[in-house]
Image (cartoon, rainbow, N blue to C red):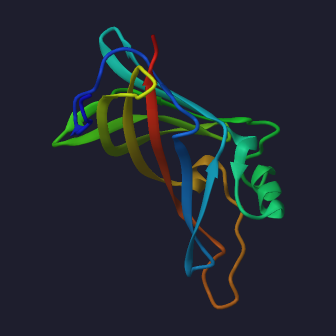
Amino acid sequence: MATATETTAIPTGIWKSDPVHSHVGFAVKHMVVATFRGSFADFDVTLANENGEPRLYGAVRVESVEVRDENLNGHLLSPDFFDAERTPEITFTSSEVRADDGELVVPGKLTIKGVTRDVEARGTIVGPAEHPAGGERIGIELETKVDRTEFGLNWNAPVPSGGVAVQNDVTLTVHLELAREE
């Protein structure tokens, strides 16, 4: 069996995320001193070729946000943040997927809380590799930073020693294992 190596080749075909072996997360500076991390448990990502051009599509169910505090989880679902009742999904649609100096570059449109903005994620692609149970897998890791206030996530509170509870810059990350669809 061949081993996978990091590559910048974008495979053809249709590739779907394996939710058990993939992760979608975010990180933001909290209370001036630490980085707070959260993730989403329910998401779908597809890498497919449209007219010979690769495209990456992703959707995250907002209600699947995971943090270690039930009260904070409820606050994130409220209109102060994601407004899950009115905007149940976060979506991403790439305008292209390309290699640039050994790095995977994925520009596209990110929609959070009903607001769509252009973003560019950068990272790596590995594979394809044969899976022991059959079929092929690829790995994609991407990261981008966004200003949460540009998407209407404006809630904040002052910290008594100075600064604010939640910084505006949020790092979004995806660590994907995608399986080739037969």
Q: So how many labels did they put on this image?
A: 0
Q: Nearer the viewer, residue 123 or 181?
A: 181
- Tell which residue pokes out farthest to the left in this image: 101
Q: In which quarter of the view is residue 43 placed?
A: top right
Viewer-side residue, 92 vs 149 = 92
On the image, the x and y values in percent for residue 149 come to: 60, 55
Quadrant location, the N terminus: top left
Compared across the picture, whether 139 is left or right of 111 comes to: left
Q: Residue at x 66, y 37 (%)?
A: 42
Up-down relation of residue 34 to residue 66 (above or below) = below
Residue under the image location 71 percent in, 41 percent down: 62
Q: Position of residue 29 (x, y in %)?
A: 55, 70
Q: Quadrant of residue 95?
A: top left
Q: Quadrant of the C terminus?
A: top left
Q: Report the residue at 29% width, 32% height from top.
A: 127
- Residue 28 drawn above or below residue 162: above
Residue 130 on image: x %, y %:
34, 26
Residue 16 against residue 127 in the figure, above or below:
above
Residue located 54% across and 61% down the image: 27
Q: On the rendered structure, is 64 left or right of 122?
A: right
- Residue 140: image location, x then y, percent: 38, 38
